[in-house]
Image: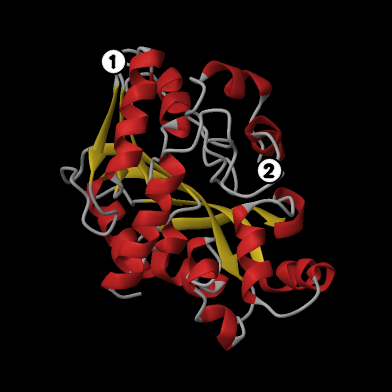
């Protein structure tokens, strides 16, 4: 993805950042964000705890679902959006812990900071930056999370290299993301709507896992894999992107989406260095 596409992605997500607080997404007849969050594995307590407007309905899983946050830990969220996962992590690490959210969109940072003020989260901060060039010190983070963001990166290998750099020895990476099960047709790969919808830019599952191994992560594991149709209603932006990009009946596209893509929750560990 070149600079022009990255800028288009940034502009589209800036638009999402300025949606009304009770909106799920920019499409008509959108499901409530709370219903979508439940479908992705968030508990009612999670949904009710965070400030209204923090969850913009842009995830594809729950990167914290299988993680045991420890008091005092430092957590980094790649592509933090409105701050939903950051605020959940903040509860787990407690007042002596720290949560850092990084996003490339100033409008998202602004919205997240507004939510931070509502939440009173003194242990959370948001930084403007690219996940391929993190504004975070080396060896400073215990846990990295990300929710349906890395698939948008033009250089996924560099994202994982950066994640490895900032993690402490023995630190954990836990991400939910969309991957491809087979190569997409050319007309979908060239669609900007499909790219922004987290489809056209997604990596093949085997390549995604190989990136992690190449970086040096150990214990790389897919702990959960979910069909696209099980987590995204037809009104979801990802599904809408497919419907726009593929000249086929909607019902057939839904079937094809499960053949071509999946949401995975992947964990990996930076080895303990002697």
Q: Is residue 238 above or below residue 120?
A: below
Instruction: Label 1: state its secondary structure.
Output: loop
List x then y, in percent, for residue 64. Answer: 52, 36
Please give the name of the residue rendered at 52% of the width and 42% of the height, measured from the top-left corner.
63
Instruction: Label 2: state its secondary structure.
Output: loop
The image quadrant of residue 5 is bottom left
List x then y, in percent, for residue 120. Answer: 35, 12
Q: Is residue 130 above or below residue 98?
A: below
Quickly name the residue at label 1. Answer: 122
Q: Is residue 74 visible?
A: no
Please give the name of the residue rendered at 77% of the width and 66% of the height, measured from the top-left corner.
254
Please give the name of the residue rendered at 44% of the width and 18% of the height, measured from the top-left corner.
91
Q: Quadrant of the N terminus?
A: bottom left
Quickly name the residue at label 2. Answer: 30
Please give the name of the residue rendered at 76% of the width and 52% of the height, measured from the top-left corner.
230
Specify which label sits upstream in the sequence, 2 or 1: 2
The image quadrant of residue 34 is top right
- Dot 2, crowdedness within 10 Å: few (<14), some or many (≥20)? some
List x then y, in percent, for residue 256. Answer: 75, 73
Question: Which is more foreground, mark 2 or mark 1?
Answer: 2
Q: Residue furthest bottom?
A: 186
The image quadrant of residue 93 is top left
- Dot 1, crowdedness within 10 Å: few (<14), some or many (≥20)? some
Horizontal relation, residue 70 to residue 228: left or right:
left
Task: Judge by depth and name the residue closer to the eye, 266 or 37.
Answer: 37
Question: Answer yes or no: do the residues labelled 2 and 1 have beta carbons within 8 Å?
Answer: no
List x then y, in percent, for residue 143. Answer: 37, 38
């Amino acid at each position: 993805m070149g600079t022009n596409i990255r800028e288009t992605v940034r502009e589209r997500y800036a638009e999402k950042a300025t949606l009304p607080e009770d909106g799920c997404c920019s499409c008509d007849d959108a499901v409530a964000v709370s219903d979508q969050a439940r479908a992705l594995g968030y508990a009612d307590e999670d949904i009710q705890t965070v400030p209204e407007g923090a969850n913009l309905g842009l995830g594809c899983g729950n990167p914290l679902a299988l993680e045991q946050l420890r008091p005092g830990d430092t957590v980094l969220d790649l592509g933090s959006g409105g701050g939903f996962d950051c605020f959940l992590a903040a509860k787990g690490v407690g007042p002596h812990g720290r949560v850092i959210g990084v996003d490339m969109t100033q409008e998202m940072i602004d919205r997240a900071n507004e939510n931070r003020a509502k939440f009173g989260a003194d242990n959370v901060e948001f930084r403007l930056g690219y996940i391929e060039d993190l504004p975070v010190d080396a060896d400073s983070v215990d846990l990295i999370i990300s929710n349906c963001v890395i698939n948008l990166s033009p250089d996924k290998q560099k994202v994982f290299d950066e994640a490895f750099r900032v993690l402490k020895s023995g630190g954990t990476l836990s991400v939910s993301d969309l991957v491809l099960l087979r190569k997409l047709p050319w007309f979908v790969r060239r669609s900007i709507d499909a790219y922004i919808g987290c489809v056209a830019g997604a990596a093949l599952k085997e390549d995604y896992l190989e990136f992690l191994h190449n970086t040096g992560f150990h214990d790389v594991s897919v702990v959960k894999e979910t069909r696209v149709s099980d987590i995204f209603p037809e009104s979801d932006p990802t599904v809408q992107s497919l419907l726009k990009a593929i000249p086929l009946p909607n019902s057939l596209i839904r079937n094809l989406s499960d053949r071509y893509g999946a949401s995975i929750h992947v964990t990996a560990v930076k080895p303990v260095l002697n």
